[in-house]
Image: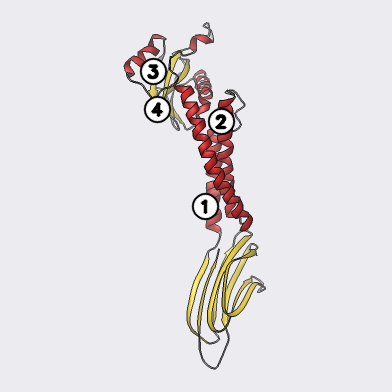
């Protein structure tokens, strides 16, 4: 048994001919397919052999023995099948033979049927994702912040990918320069997903509820902004006497202040640069303690 390697190259439904080309190229380089898969394929090193590979799509095989015998009669060796109906075959390559010798011939209309089903499914997915995209853009206009950008790019990534797939199936453009493969789409999606997680994790979430008697006391909450962005403040105060709510930067300059007895504010946009900040809540000093209740959330 020769050296083995694993490939995680992924191909979309319309890229099956590109997958065949890549299998043939690997074979010429001395890597022969042992087991094909949707997201994981295993190759074995064998410089003494060279094959031509083919894929057949069929999810409605009544008699697999007869199905495989049909290919064996054409000189094809069966490798394996995937869970979603793709079957891998290979035939020893002879450069003296015409390329037509390495085409497979079946009476199955499964691939055209699969492509029609895929186009209908892609249109449905595009409609749903486009609706979410419009919603996210509207939210971005209403409440702009960096954490929304990765999700918008994520949805655009899927729409472009599905749109190109529909175009290539409709126009039969099998050999269009592969500028946006399934692997590329998945890589962009993963980057967007990770970017969203990182941006969300780095953005401080400050919230608290203060309730009780007060007479000139001050509450402090320090936090750090790692990247400039819009923050949104929800603030509710129900006090017997005025209480001052402030957000100060590192120099002590107030970027937001509000002093009142009773107030309710929702989604007040505050632009914060990168740096350290402090939330300060100060009550007035009086002859006697007064009741205070303040709830705030800054995210």
Give the residue number, with chain letter if any, for mark 4: 82
Residue at horizontal 61 percent and vertical 56 percent from the top? 145
Q: In the rendered structure, which disc, 1 or 3, sits on the residue that comes first in sequence?
A: 3
Q: Nearer the viewer, mark 3 or mark 4?
A: 4
Image location of residue 120, percent across then percent down: 50, 32
SS class, disc 2? helix
- In the picture, the disc for residue 197 is 1
Mark 3 → mark 2, Cα distance in angstroms: 30 Å
Mark 3 → mark 4, Cα distance in angstroms: 12 Å
Q: Residues within 10 Å of mark 4 (few under 14, many from 20)?
A: few
SS class, disc 4? loop
The answer to which image quadrant residue 243 occupies is: bottom right
Q: Residues within 10 Å of mark 2 (few under 14, many from 20)?
A: many
Image location of residue 181, percent across then percent down: 56, 32
Mark 1 → mark 2, Cα distance in angstroms: 31 Å
- In the picture, the disc for residue 78 is 3
Left or right for 255, reference 104? right
Q: In the rendered structure, which disc, 4 or 1, sits on the residue that comes first in sequence?
A: 4
Q: In the rendered structure, which disc, 2 or 4, sits on the residue that comes first in sequence?
A: 4
User: Is residue 163 or residue 76 the one in the foreground?
Assistant: 163
- In the picture, the disc for residue 166 is 2
Q: Nearer the viewer, mark 4 or mark 1?
A: 4
Image location of residue 268, percent across then percent down: 61, 66
Q: Is there any visible trace of residue 158 in the rendered image?
A: yes
């Amino acid at each position: 048994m020769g050296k083995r390697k694993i490939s995680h190259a992924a191909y979309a439904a319309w890229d099956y001919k590109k997958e065949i080309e890549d299998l043939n190229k690997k074979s010429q380089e001395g890597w022969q397919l042992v087991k094909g898969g949707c997201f994981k394929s295993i190759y074995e090193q064998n410089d003494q052999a060279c094959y031509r590979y083919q894929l057949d799509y069929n999810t409605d095989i009544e008699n697999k023995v007869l199905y495989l015998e049909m290919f064996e009669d054409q000189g094809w060796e069966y490798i394996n099948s995937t869970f979603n109906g793709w079957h891998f075959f290979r035939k020893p390559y002879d450069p003296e033979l015409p390329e037509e010798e390495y085409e497979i011939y079946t009476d199955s209309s499964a691939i055209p049927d699969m492509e029609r089903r895929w186009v209908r499914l892609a249109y449905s997915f595009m409609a749903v994702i486009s609706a979410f995209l419009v919603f996210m853009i509207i939210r971005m206009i209403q409440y702009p912040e960096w954490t929304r950008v990765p999700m918008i790019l994520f949805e655009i990534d899927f729409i472009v990918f599905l749109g190109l797939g529909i175009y290539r199936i409709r126009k039969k453009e099998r050999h269009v320069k592969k500028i946006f493969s399934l692997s590329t789409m998945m890589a962009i999606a993963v980057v967007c997903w990770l970017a969203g997680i990182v941006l969300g994790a780095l953005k401080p979430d400050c919230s608290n509820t203060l309730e009780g008697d007060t007479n000139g006391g001050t509450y402090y909450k320090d936090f750090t902004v790692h990247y400039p962005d819009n923050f949104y403040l929800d603030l509710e105060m129900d006090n017997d006497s005025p209480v001052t709510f402030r957000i100060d930067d590192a120099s002590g300059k107030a970027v937001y202040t509000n002093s009142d007895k009773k107030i309710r504010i929702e989604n007040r946009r505050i632009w914060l640069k990168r740096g350290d900040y402090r939330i300060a809540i100060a009550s007035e000093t009086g002859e006697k303690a007064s009741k205070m209740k303040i709830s705030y959330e800054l995210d």
